[in-house]
Image: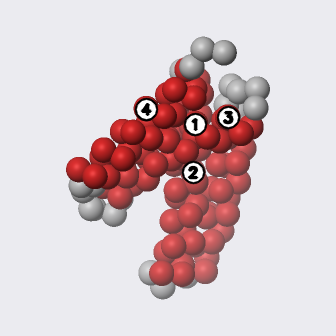
Amino acid sequence: MHSIAVYIGAAIAEIAGCFAFWAWLRLGKSPLWLVPGILSLMVFAGLLTRVESDFAGRSYAAYGGIYIAASLMWLWLIEGRMPDRWDVTGGAVCLIGAAIILFGPR
């Protein structure tokens, strides 16, 4: 369960960091948005190293599913656009894939 919490924290940090760049380049916000964006991306990278996995590639692969689901939550909660049924279906498939990677017997 520790890994799931780390993945969620990493996803929030990555999405927030990337959104800072989006806000600067696409929404016309101040370049000062890049400062918290870069810091947030540094937190993301640090958190992802804390996942309980023997291999980085496996950790990153499982993270992909968490990232997709978190991005859809961002879409809904921060950007105010409710995910459609295809978004939700795709996110669920990705979470199932992440769970298989994380919890599969080894």
Left or right of 5 in this view: 58: right
Q: For residue 58, which numbered disc appears in the image?
A: 3
Q: Residue at x 30, y 44 (%)?
A: 89
Circle nearer the viewer, 2 or 4: 4
Upstream in sequence: badge 3 or badge 2: 2
Residue 82 image offset from top left, x and y in percent: 24, 56
Disc 2 target residue: 13
Q: Are marks 1 and 3 in contact (CB under 8 Å)?
A: yes
Upstream in sequence: badge 4 or badge 3: 3
Disc 1 target residue: 62
Amino acid bearing label 2:
Ala
Secondary element under disc 1, as helix, strand or loop, is helix
Q: Are marks 2 and 4 in contact (CB under 8 Å)?
A: no
Secondary element under disc 2, as helix, strand or loop, is helix
Residue 7 image offset from top left, x and y in percent: 57, 37
Disc 4 target residue: 96
Upstream in sequence: badge 4 or badge 1: 1
Q: Picture quarter containing residue 5?
A: top right
Mark 4 nearby-residue class (10 Å; few <14, some 14–19, many ≥20): some
Residue 87 visible in the current orientation: yes
Mark 1 nearby-residue class (10 Å; few <14, some 14–19, many ≥20): many
Label tally: 4
Upstream in sequence: badge 2 or badge 4: 2
Left or right of 67 in this view: 82: left
Secondary element under disc 4, as helix, strand or loop, is helix
Q: Residue at x 58, y 61 (%)?
A: 17
Residue 96 image offset from top left, x and y in percent: 43, 32
Relative to 39, does residue 12 appear above or below in the rendering? above
Q: Which color mode does the image show?
A: secondary structure
Task: Report how far apart the C-alphas of labels 4 and 3 lie in the structure.
Answer: 15 Å
